[in-house]
Amino acid sequence: MNIFTRNTLWVLFYLFFTAGPLFVLLIGPLPPSRDFWTEFSAAAGYAGLAILGLQVGLTARFRAVTSPWGEDTIYHFHKQMSFIALVLIIAHPVILFILRPERLALLNFIEAPWRARFAAISTYSLIALMVMAMWRVKLKISYEVWHYTHIILAVLVIGAGLLHTVAWGFYLDAPLKRALWTGLAILWCCLLIYTRIVRPFLMLRKPYQVIATRHERGGSTTLVMQPVGHAGFPFVPGQFGWLNVWGSPFKLTSHPFSFSSSAEMAKETIEMTIQDAGDYTRKIRNVTAGKRVYIDGPYGAFTVGNPADMHVLIAGGIGITPMMSIIRTFADLGDKRPIILIYGNKNWDGITFREELEALSDRINLQVIHVLEQPPKDWTGETGIISSELIQRYIPAPYEQHEYFICGPNRMMDEIEKTLAALQVPLAKYHSERYHFV
Ligand SMILES: Cc1cc2nc3c(=O)[nH]c(=O)nc-3n(C[C@H](O)[C@H](O)[C@H](O)COP(=O)(O)OP(=O)(O)OC[C@H]3O[C@@H](n4cnc5c(N)ncnc54)[C@H](O)[C@@H]3O)c2cc1C
């Protein structure tokens, strides 16, 4: 199946589960018809609820869902769909209040009937969830607290929303419709149960053990991990996994990290190289050999494998990790196709994997171009940030024949994506991995 057909099928599948439930309401005997805006408002409410219910599936890390698009695209889509759902859910009562202002009395939580209370709980929870998602950093809420709250609020939004529709009953009085919507609600619950209980349980049976740690340049630490009692999992260079170092896989606090080791070594060991970035990553440097950890993976579409005459890797700082996996895998396979690595860092001493890259340049067809923001006095190489002009100086035409991989700070990635678009490199020829998609 080609990419276009596969992606079209996914879009149709998504529409089936979001717009489909709305059309189910039109099956069979209909309740007495009302004016257009009242019906429109009801449709907005049901559509918003269906979109929110399926969000559980979008973020459930199903490989079949994420791999055609990439995890960051799915999270971006998840965010955009939440905005659409918010607009629909808020439009629902607002239209009703405009049509019949006396309904504003339903906002009195104490005196309102339960069906209105459920609506209020669902809507207020959704507003709180969106505010926290948009302004988490400004509100100084830690990622972990935000994550727990996000899940609780999401359950409240969907649970209370469903109770509101059942208690109001207008469209769901017919047994068939009630059964179909109940089925949908069961599906959402199953998705949640799978993500939070079944998958962690499966991971519990496939632990890994840290067998060595390496402190790298640039304030990062490499964890070398080995599967315990199982064969591990294969991955394609460029992919990542969710790492859980403290506690069981049932804990929410797993973080995404690219595999930095060669994919050829996956059966024996797997490595992740992690830079101090906050409360979780700071503790990684204290991890010692013997520690039991859990890795959920592999994920991501930032992968080699398409026909290309040359691979152009553009990395900023810790964005080198997936590139390192690509380069190490090429070395292990004896793949002699040319690779150009343009690698931006603050200074010479902080270049993660500097020496190993030098050594690998002798083994495979690898050209490394270091770009330093704060170069030493005697530096004759590239300086500043990785710019469009710099890229064009090093990459030979025809640009569309190469495959590009970009990973680093968002500002750098935006600039490079614009450059590649200007050079008429087709979208399918470049891959971006954004480390801050949440
Ligand atoms: C696909 C992918 C691959 C990555 N690979 C690497 C890698 O190889 N090496 C490396 O050092 N870093 C990598 N990162 C970044 C790394 O996941 C974050 O820096 C780390 O999770 C920060 O956690 P913290 O608690 O230390 O910092 P915090 O200060 O809590 O978080 C810093 C920022 O990291 C992001 N973040 C935090 N926790 C998570 C989470 N659980 N899920 C998603 N984003 C989160 C948030 O945007 C947050 O604002 C990768 C990120 C992604 C998305």
Image (cartoon, grey):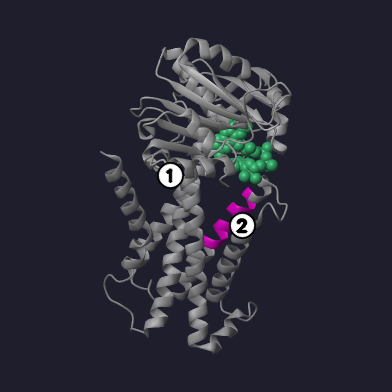
Which residue is rendered at x = 68% and y = 31% of the image?
346
Which residues, given as a range, are shown in magenta?
147-158
Answer left or right for 427 relative to 366. left
Q: Is residue 224 left or right of residue 93?
A: right
Name above or below for residue 359 compared with residue 254. above
Whichever of labels 2 and 1 marks the residue nearer the N terminus, that label is 2
- Which element is circle 1 on? helix
Residue at 63% from the left image edge and 62% from the top image edge: 128
Residue at 47% x, 42% y: name it: 419
Q: Do the residues bearing badges 2 and 1 touch, measured as CB atoms within 8 Å?
A: no
Residue 408 at x, y percent in the picture: 57, 36
Q: Is mark 1 within 8 Å of ligand 1?
A: no
Mark 1, Cα crowd under 10 Å, few <14 / some 14-19 / many 20+, is: few
For the residue labelled by badge 2, is the local secondary structure a helix, a strand or a loop? helix
**In this figure, which residue is indicated by the disc labeled 2?**
134
Q: CA distance from mark 2 to mark 1?
A: 31 Å
**What is the number of the mark on residue 422?**
1
Q: Is residue 57 left or right of residue 114?
A: left
Q: In front: 419, or 303?
A: 419
Give the quadrant of residue 371: top right
Of residues 405 and 329, the one drawn nearer to the viewer in this rendering: 405
Q: Is residue 243 visible?
A: no
Is residue 78 something that shows in the picture?
Answer: yes
